[in-house]
Amino acid sequence: MARHSKLQKQVLSLYRQFLRAGQDKPGFIPRIRDEFKENSRIKKSDVMHIEYLYRRGQRQLEQLKDVNTKQLGSFSKPAEKS
Amino acid sequence: MASRVLLQCVRSLGRPSLRLSAANLAVRATAAPAAARRPLSFAADSRRPRWLGQSSIPSVGVLCRQYGDLPPLTLETIKDRVMYVLKLYDKINPEKLQTSSHFMKDLGLDSLDQVEIIMAMEDEFGFEIPDAEAEKLMSPGEIVQYIADKKDVYE
């Protein structure tokens, strides 16, 4: 696609802001990349969903930029041995 | 206050215990007025040993100012640095990478990866690239051209 639509540009600038904000705090970058990669699969026509995720992302960005947020960790379930 | 610092500088120049000789000092002839022009650097303790070492130059003929800067950019160095950063990116296959390879058509990246690449370029060269122009840069050659335009590098 030659030119991005306005919504695409907003999403890309949000991605950029997320990456900048998450550079100094450990654990955020893989999560940010996975989340955006996963949601990039949504169809372009599903505007409501995209806008909802965009607003959600903005709120999460505010939380990330907060001074009190230090790092991100996650628990994962070990593979079942059955 | 400046005159007090000047007095201190002149007094310390006279002290023989400060005569530390170094080979490279002969190149930079630091005169007393030139040293006094940096009263703040004299006050900082971390600079003190360096300043003391330079005070042993007796000749006052050449006034010399020292600035610090990076080596000048050329098209070759910009291209080398851009390719180096791209080879370090894990989603790019280094063998397939050429100067003219398109990120989306040849290398199979998407726009999110392109944003990451442009951010890596910003970090490498130390200046901001606005979003409107960043989304148009689709190959290493275009990136090199853009940086050369911004940094006034001609050949």
Image (cartoon, helix red, strand yellow):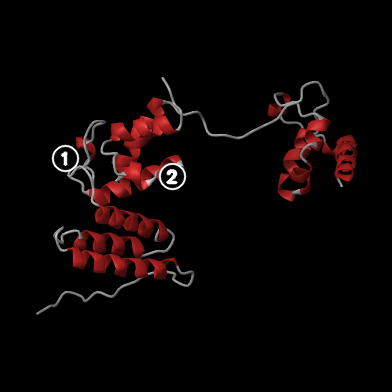
Residue nearest the observer in this picture, B124 or B84: B124
* Residue drawn 79% across the image and 35% down it: B35
Residue nearest the observer in this picture, A62 or B94: A62
Q: Is residue B130 left or right of residue B96?
A: right
Q: How many marks?
A: 2
Residue B96 tag number? none
Asked whether the viewer can see residue B29, the reply is yes
Q: Is residue B4 left or right of residue B54?
A: right
Task: Give the mark nearest the N terminus, 1 or 2.
Answer: 1
Residue B105 tag number? 1
Judged from the image, the secondary structure of the residue bearing numbered disc 1 is: loop
* Residue drawn 34% across the image and 45% down it: B132
Amino acid type, callout 1: Lys
Position of residue A49 relative to residue A44, above or below, is below
* Residue drawn 53% across the image and 34% down it: B70
Amino acid type, callout 2: Glu
